C-alpha cells in the first residue's frame, strides 16, 4: 500500500514521498519554550494552536500516519541572487537586532520555533520551523561563526539601483494552489485504498503541524542549522506538504542531521536572526519582517534588508547541500519571470487595483499593497539614488500611513548618501 501511495505521489508531480507515525514530535517541550520566549513575534496563531501542533490526534482524531511529501522549486533558469547585495550583514553580531527587539544579550538556548506553519504564515516552506536536535555541530563540537562583515549598500557596491529581490519560492504562481490540487487527489486515493471509515486531511502550509519535525522523522531530509529542511537529494529549495490519515502504515526510517561543522547559514544571515545552530529569533528574520510583520519595520533593522522586498534566501542559498538540488516537475510551468527582479520604482506606483492584478495569483498577495510598498520604500532607501526621489515623494503623501512613513525614511537615506558623496568629493579637492 505504501508503494502505491508513494508512486501515486510521484505521478502527481511530487519529488519525494515518505511516511511517519502520528506520534507527538519529540521537540514539543522546546517548541513551547520558544513560544514562551516570544521568539515568534506577532505570529500569535502559533500560540493559539500550539496544542494541536504537539498532538496530532487533536488535528484528526484517530490519526495513525503522516504522509510527508516534498516538491522542488529549484529553478536553474533564473538563478538571480535573492538578496542582490552579496554578504550584506550587520557589523557586529546582533548589535542592531537586539536594539530593535529588546532581546537579551544572552538569549536562552532554544531551537527554532515553528515560525511559518500555515497559509497564514507565508514563509512556511522556506521559513523556519521548530527544530529538534542538538545545538552543537555533529560530533559534539560547538559550531563556530565567522565575524560579521560590514553592511554595504548596493550603491557602495557599484550597483546604484537594482531591482527588488523576491525569495525564490514566491517567483511562481501560488504554491498553495498548485500543490493543493494534487494533494486533494492523493488524499482521495489514500481513502480509497484504506476503505470504508478511512479519513484523511491534507495540508500545504495550512495545518497546525510541526512539518519539518515530521519530515525529518519520515526521512525526507534533516533540519539544518538554519532551521529549514535539507534533502540530500533535493537540497533545501523545497516545498513541504502532508496528509494526516487514520490509515496505519509502517513508518520509514528518520533522517539524521548532516550539517557537520558547517556554519555558512549562520554567517550569511543579514540580521543574525539565526542566533546559534538550530536557533531562530523570528523577530529578526527578514522573511518575518517583510511578510509576517504588519506594522513598521524597526528602523534599526531596515539597512540590513538591502533590496529585499519579499522574504530572504541568504541562509538557504549558501547551503552546500544545494549542489544536489534539481528542478522539480511540478512548479516549472508556474514560473513568473517578471518576479525575478522587478523594478522598484514601478512597484511603488501600484495602486490597489494594480497590486491585485499583478500579485493575486502569487504568494505576495499576502502582504497586501501596504506591506509590499512598505518594503519597496525600505529597499529604495537602501539602494536607491536621486532618480527614486520623485516616486518616493509621491509615496510620502500616500493615504496609507505605513507607506508614507517608510517613504519619508527612504528619502532621508538617499539624501544622506548624496550629502556624504558631496562631502567626500569636496575633501578630495
Image (cartoon, rainbow, N blue to C red):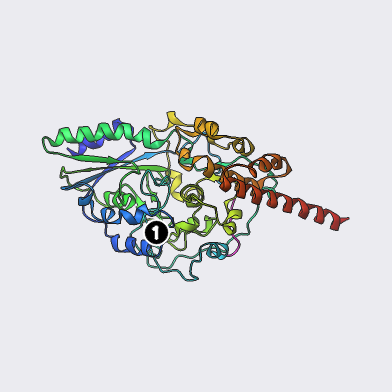
- In the displayed image of the protein, which residue is found farthest to the front? 399
Q: Position of residue 353 (x, y in %)?
A: 53, 31
Closer-to-camera residue (317/374): 374
Question: Which residue lies at the image location 21% right of the left edge and 33% below the top edge?
Answer: 188
Left or right of 174? Residue 64 is: left
- Percent across and percent down for residue 253 are 24, 51
In x, y percent, where is residue 289? 50, 52
Closer to the camera, 158 or 281? 281
Number of numbered markers: 1
Mark 1 secondary-structure assignment: loop
Vertical position of residue 86 compared to residue 346: above or below: below
Is residue 411 visible to the viewer in this orientation of the structure? yes
Residue reaching furthest to the bottom: 106
- Extreme-top residue of the structure: 333
On the image, the x and y values in percent for residue 39 come to 42, 60
Q: Which residues are magenta?
A: 85-92
Does the magenta portion include 91? Answer: yes
Q: Is residue 138 left or right of residue 150?
A: left
Q: Which residue is mark 1?
A: 112
Amino acid at each position: 500500500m505504501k508503494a502505491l501511495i508513494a508512486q501515486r505521489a510521484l505521478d502527481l508531480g511530487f519529488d519525494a514521498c515518505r511516511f511517519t507515525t502520528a506520534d507527538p514530535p519529540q521537540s514539543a517541550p522546546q517548541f513551547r519554550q520558544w513560544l514562551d520566549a516570544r521568539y515568534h513575534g506577532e505570529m500569535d496563531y502559533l500560540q493559539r494552536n500550539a496544542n494541536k501542533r504537539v498532538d496530532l490526534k487533536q488535528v484528526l482524531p484517530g490519526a495513525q500516519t503522516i504522509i510527508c511529501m516534498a516538491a522542488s522549486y529549484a529553478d536553474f533558469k533564473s538563478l538571480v541572487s535573492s538578496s542582490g547585495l552579496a554578504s550584506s550583514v550587520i557589523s557586529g553580531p546582533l548589535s542592531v537586532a537586539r536594539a530593535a527587539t529588546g532581546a537579551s544579550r544572552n538569549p536562552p538556548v532554544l531551537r527554532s520555533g515553528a515560525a511559518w506553519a500555515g497559509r497564514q504564515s507565508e514563509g512556511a516552506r522556506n521559513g523556519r520551523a521548530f527544530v529538534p536536535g542538538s545545538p552543537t555541530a555533529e560530533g559534539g563540537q560547538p559550531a563556530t561563526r565567522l565575524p560579521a562583515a560590514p553592511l554595504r549598500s548596493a550603491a557602495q557596491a557599484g550597483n546604484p539601483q537594482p531591482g527588488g529581490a523576491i525569495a525564490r519560492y514566491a517567483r511562481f504562481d501560488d504554491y498553495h494552489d498548485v500543490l493543493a490540487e494534487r494533494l486533494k487527489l492523493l488524499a482521495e486515493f489514500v481513502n480509497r485504498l484504506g476503505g470504508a471509515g478511512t479519513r484523511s486531511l491534507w495540508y500545504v502550509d495550512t495545518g497546525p503541524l510541526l512539518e519539518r519535525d515530521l519530515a525529518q522523522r519520515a526521512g525526507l531530509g534533516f533540519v539544518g542549522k538554519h532551521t529549514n529542511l535539507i534533502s540530500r537529494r533535493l537540497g533545501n529549495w523545497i516545498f513541504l506538504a502532508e496528509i494526516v490519515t487514520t490509515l496505519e502504515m509502517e513508518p520509514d526510517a528518520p533522517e539524521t542531521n548532516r550539517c557537520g561543522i558547517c556554519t555558512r547559514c549562520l554567517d550569511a544571515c543579514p540580521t543574525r536572526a539565526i542566533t546559534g545552530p538550530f536557533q531562530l529569533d523570528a523577530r529578526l528574520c527578514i522573511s518575518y519582517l517583510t511578510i509576517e510583520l504588519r506594522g513598521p519595520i524597526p528602523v534599526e533593522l531596515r539597512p540590513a534588508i538591502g533590496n529585499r522586498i519579499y522574504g530572504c534566501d541568504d541562509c538557504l542559498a549558501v547551503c552546500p547541500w544545494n549542489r544536489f538540488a534539481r528542478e522539480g516537475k511540478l512548479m516549472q510551468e508556474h514560473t513568473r519571470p517578471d518576479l525575478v527582479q522587478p523594478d522598484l520604482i514601478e512597484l511603488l506606483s501600484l495602486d490597489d487595483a494594480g497590486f491585485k492584478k499583478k500579485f493575486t495569483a502569487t504568494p505576495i498577495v499576502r502582504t497586501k499593497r501596504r506591506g509590499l510598498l512598505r518594503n519597496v520604500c525600505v529597499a529604495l532607501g537602501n539602494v536607491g539614488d536621486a532618480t527614486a526621489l520623485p516616486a518616493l515623494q509621491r509615496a510620502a503623501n500616500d493615504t496609507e500611513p505605513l507607506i508614507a512613513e517608510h517613504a519619508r525614511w527612504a528619502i532621508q537615506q538617499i539624501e544622506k548618501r548624496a550629502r556624504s558623496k558631496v562631502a567626500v568629493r569636496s575633501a578630495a579637492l
